[in-house]
Image (cartoon, rainbow, N blue to C red):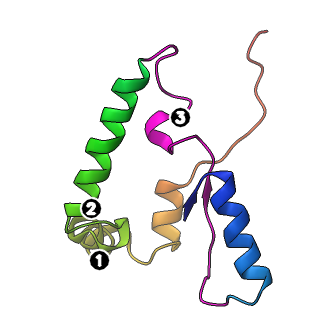
Amino acid sequence: MVSGLQKARRLLDEIRAGRKDLHFVEVMSCPGGCISGGGQTLGADVEAVRARMASLYALDETSTLRTAHGNPALRALYDEFLGQPLGERSHSLLHTHYQPRDVGF
């Protein structure tokens, strides 16, 4: 995963140059990542956003659990109830299906 379009460009250059250790690439393009992304209050104080970013990054660095697939609770949910990831039960319960609707505009 990379955050920002400059880092995405660098990663794409590495891939074009032959980097082969990746199976999936995710690009987060909000400046600073989701911490300061589109869901934030408009006109938020820049220093408050920076402080929130620093706090969250510090928490992430010291966390022993950093991936969803490594979460024991999530693993137990699949083992005990959902079955195989992308299996019939997990797919029917966790995936959204979209359909056109009249929203009255």
Of badges 2 and 3, the one in the foreground is 2
* Magenta residue span: 20-44
The crowding category of the residue bearing disc 3, from other C-alpha atoms within 10 Å (few below 14, some 14 to 19, many at least 20), is: few
Reply yes or no: does residue 23 show up in magenta: yes
Sooner in the amino-acid sequence: mark 1 or mark 3: 3
Q: Position of residue 72 (x, y in %)?
A: 21, 71
Element at badge 3? loop
The residue tagged 2 is 61
Q: Callout 1: few (<14), some (14-19), or many (20+) C-alpha neighbours within 10 Å? A: few
| Spatial CA span between label 1 and label 2 | 28 Å
Mark 1 vs 2: CB contact within 8 A: no
Task: Decide which of 51, 92 is in the foreground and name it.
Answer: 51
Find disc 3 in the rendering and name its residue: 37
Image coordinates of residue 69 in percent, x first then y, are 36, 72
87 relative to 52, above or below: below
Residue beneath disc 1: 79
